[in-house]
Amino acid sequence: MELNQELLTKNKEAEICSLYIAPDDLARNLTANGDRYKEIAKWMVDYQPEQIIFAGSGASYCSTYSAYYYMKTCSGMPVAHYYGPELMNEENIPLKGTKTIAILASYSGKTADTLEACEYLKKMGIPRIAISNQENSPLPQNCDRSLTYNSKCLYTSAMGNALMLMVEYNELRQEKEAAGTMRDALVRLPEQMIAILSQSDEFARTEAARHLDSKMFYCLGDGATWALAYQY
């Protein structure tokens, strides 16, 4: 079966398929936001939180999961991960009176669930950090600190920014081994992504043809790759 090259090009350039620009955008973000990571991490350390919570919806829920999983497995800081609406259930998630920092992600900065959760946390007096595509969108404007990535890579760029912020935070908390390992992995990631692109194209063409008549696909993942499976 012949591929429709026009449709293939269109899909490769679509917002949901950012694989082809993700390496360059991730590398650019890690460099451009270097000072910002350090500034926000110091602000977090100075606040001395008892816990850090991550929240978002859809792809942004996934992008914060990677940072949450890293902290959960490599840091002594208590962490939790929620959908926006879950945070507004005081009976199940007591936040009032706690020293909590919330990290909220929304690509558009306009996600209703996340904005409502942000307002709820604000009334609780809980400091909030936004991770979003544009600085002038509602979520960053309503948070105490923000990281923006100016990229259509709605998963990769947000994930990289959240992880590097946690790296800087762990570094300041003297959890240097975990910080160093993740920092090195993030810095190498763009080059590794570029290296596998051509191989991925070849594999995808072969497998797409082989499964052309398939009616159902399951995307499975666990641990650090759970969010990636959800994204697909």
Image (cartoon, rainbow, N blue to C red):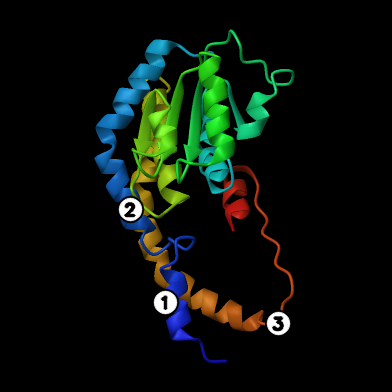
Q: In front: 29, or 116?
A: 116
Q: In the rendered view of the protein, which quadrant contains the N terminus?
A: bottom right
- Amino acid type, callout 2: Asp
Q: In front: 123, or 78?
A: 123
User: Can see residue 179?
Assistant: no
Residue 213 is tagged as 3
Q: Residue at x 31, y 42 (%)?
A: 30
> Disc 2 and disc 1: Cα gap in Å?
19 Å
Outermost residue to the bottom? 1
Residue 64 is tagged as none
Circles 2, 1 touching at the beta carbon (< 8 Å): no
Could you say where residue 17 lies in the image, as x and y percent from the top left? 47, 63
> Disc 1 and disc 3: Cα gap in Å?
22 Å
Residue 25 is tagged as 2
Q: Alpha-carbon neighbours of circle 3 within 10 Å: few (<14), some, or many (≥20)?
A: few
Residue 9 is tagged as 1
Q: Residue at x 30, y 49 (%)?
A: 27
Q: In front: 199, or 147?
A: 147
Which of the 4 image quarters holds residue 214? bottom right
- Amino acid type, callout 1: Thr
Sooner in the amino-acid sequence: mark 2 or mark 1:
1
Could you say where residue 68 lies in the image, as x and y percent from the top left? 54, 33
Could you say where residue 11 lies in the image, as x and y percent from the top left? 47, 72
Q: Alpha-carbon neighbours of circle 2 within 10 Å: few (<14), some, or many (≥20)?
A: many
SS state under label 3: loop
